[in-house]
Image (cartoon, grey):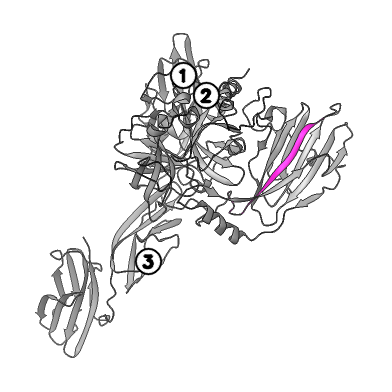
Amino acid sequence: MKESNKYFRQYLQAWFALPGMLLFLFFTPPSFAQLSYGGRPASLTAKSIREIPVIRMPVFDVRTYIREQEDLNGRDFKKLVFARSFELMVDPSSDGAWTELQNGTRVWRVALQSRGAFSINLIFSRFRIEPGVTVFVYNSGQSDIRGAFDSRNNRNSASLALSPVRGDKVIVEMQVEAGVADYGELVIGRLNHDFIDIFNPKQTKSGAARECNIDINCPPGDAWQTQKNAVVRLTINGTSLCTGVLVNNTSNDGKPYLLTANHCIGDSADAANSVFIFGYESPFCNGGNGSVMSSLSGSAVVAAQRNLDFTLVLLEDMPPLAYRPWYAGWDRTGVTPDNTVSVHHPSGSVKKISLDYDQPVTGTFGAGFTQDGHWLVKQWDIGTTEYGSSGSPLFSQDGFLKGTLTGGRARCGFAVDDYFSKFSLAWDLFGSVTTQLKPWLDPLDTAEEKLDGLNPYRDNELAADFTISTKEICLGDKVVFSDFSTGDIDSWYWDFGEGADPPDAVSRGPHMVKYSGSGERIASLTVENHAGSAFAELEFDLAVKSEDLPVAGFSYEEDMFSVQFIDMSQNAVSYYWEFSDSRISTLINPVNTYSSEGEFTARQLVRNRACSDTSVQAIIVTSLAGASEPQKEIRVYPVPAMNFLTIDTGGSLQQDLVIELLSVSGQRLFRKEIPAGQSLITLDTGRYPPGAYILNISSGNDQFNLKIPIIK
């Protein structure tokens, strides 16, 4: 029997022994871990397929539905609802159409449509098919196909949740080989209508991970290339997106435990109808979407607690070696980490990384939650979290799991106040075996306070294997090489190829390597133990972007509370602005209207493929009106001023000049008379504190004033 199914049997006894605990699981022969098995729908080749009956979902108002979900979500939870669910009971015995092909294969098909959906995902409420039967799901253009699914996909729960298919119409096709009398059980129980387009999410509250989020394969993620492989995207019940983290246990036996938030997976139905996506990340920094094909379906709850907001599930199958999974190590001491990192899937997008260089503090998420049960990240220094990040791990500076995200106010432009459920309290604060982590993550009762992470395939036969973080970098950035070899390894030898700095290494790593230029590279890894050695090499085409690098820069013009920002960057392809009043923009030349006076910090981030640059300026906003522009022959610069301010008359004035510098309250700070004919006057502004000032200039009967921000 396969190990992962044996794990289900072990803990089910504990669940069924508890009064009032319902866990609807059914035992079947073990199934292989991969979600689908290739093949082609018969309709792609067969000409005798009949017309397909179409079952249409009722039309609904998307905006109203989104508002309703936001009201239900409340509390700043960061689960993202992306789809509306329609309950069905579609059965081949009563719906759709059957056709028999010339080779004796029987084909059943039915079409399901929900107009306006960006994608559709299905949940089979009964999926228990016989050998010789295969199932496909595809869109009407046959450009997006899921399957084949066969008897190896029969779940312990007898249900099967699938990943979304693009478009607003899908076809379900079942093929029954000649000689197979009974196909088994197949019931389509739910259709989920994607209303935000998770394949191409927009930048809205319930849409894309915004530009302030940092790809895991950008330089801030270099040191986290191992831990990132523990982070998984969750689709729950076909309607919600969250994040979870694979966790190790003291047996180091590879049991596929995953920790997430209780408000994401709250019960056995949620767990059974979850799809887990592995390795969903951008191929390089700012490189767009990755693949969602590395997936598993189905899990069962082993421990959960609502007040502390955590759920531990056991996946129905162990993630296969090809997914390169990593089971995160943990720290249950409760000691405050020096700084923290979170890796997550904001808005269901590719993996992002957020970093806080300060210590978190102890906090309470709100009424109904465990007092002092959370780590509070007061402000992210890099990145943020968003809807879809719920359940994501909080790692300490040394890479140990310290908690999982419940929620908070943090978002782009306002990256403050995120709450992570404390791993140390989830360990054994609550008394039942089903409300604590300890029985599952320390089955040997070792009392370990810290546990290292695990490559679950380390005990396989000796084999060399490694990954690279990216195939495109900006000049000066690094490629990270991570070891995923198996076997009891004594030594490693790396050769990073031509132009590498360093050229080689003799430890496991991860290793961060610079390259001087673009071109074909061959990197290799040799691993050895007492029984022999193994070798692996990877040929890759590396792009090192060294020309047309983006350079950030901007100026601005202020009109009372309204500030026009003027882009002065070079070689930029995309733009992201923060104005420090919670507003953001992706326009080239945005206008931001502030609601109050004060000093604000404007930040411009520009990108060009793998490269980015940032410019930051202080913005002084006042409500003072009536300032008039100088005459055309007088120039005042720089504005804003730092250590000096220059007034250039061009030598054209025929009368003496009087210059005054006033505070915004009207107090005169400086006055000087300048004889006619002097063209350049320099004022020492470095002695004044930052803020807004008024420059008065008079010459004869002409008088005007100009608002001057002074910054440091």
Residue 104 image-quadrant placement: top right
| Marks 1 and 2 in Cβ contact (< 8 Å) | yes
Residue type pointed to by label 2: Lys
Name above or below for residue 378 compared with residue 227. below
Q: Position of residue 105 (x, y in %)?
A: 85, 32
Can the viewer see residue 215 in this picture? no
Magenta portion: prevailing SS class = strand
> How many other residues sit within 10 Å of disc 2, few (<14), some (14-19) or many (≥20)?
many
Give the mark, 3 or 2, whose residue is nearer the N terminus. Answer: 2
Question: What kind of element bears circle 2?
Answer: loop
Q: Point out which mark residue 566 bears.
A: 3
Screen quadrant of the C terminus? bottom left
> Who is closer to the viewer here, 80 or 327?
80
566 left or right, relative to 288: left
Q: Point out which mark residue 255 bears.
A: 2
Q: Name the residue under label 1.
A: 251
Residue at image location 59% in from the left, 52% down from the top: 197
Q: Distance between the residues labelled 1 and 2?
A: 9 Å
> Who is closer to the viewer here, 558 or 366?
366
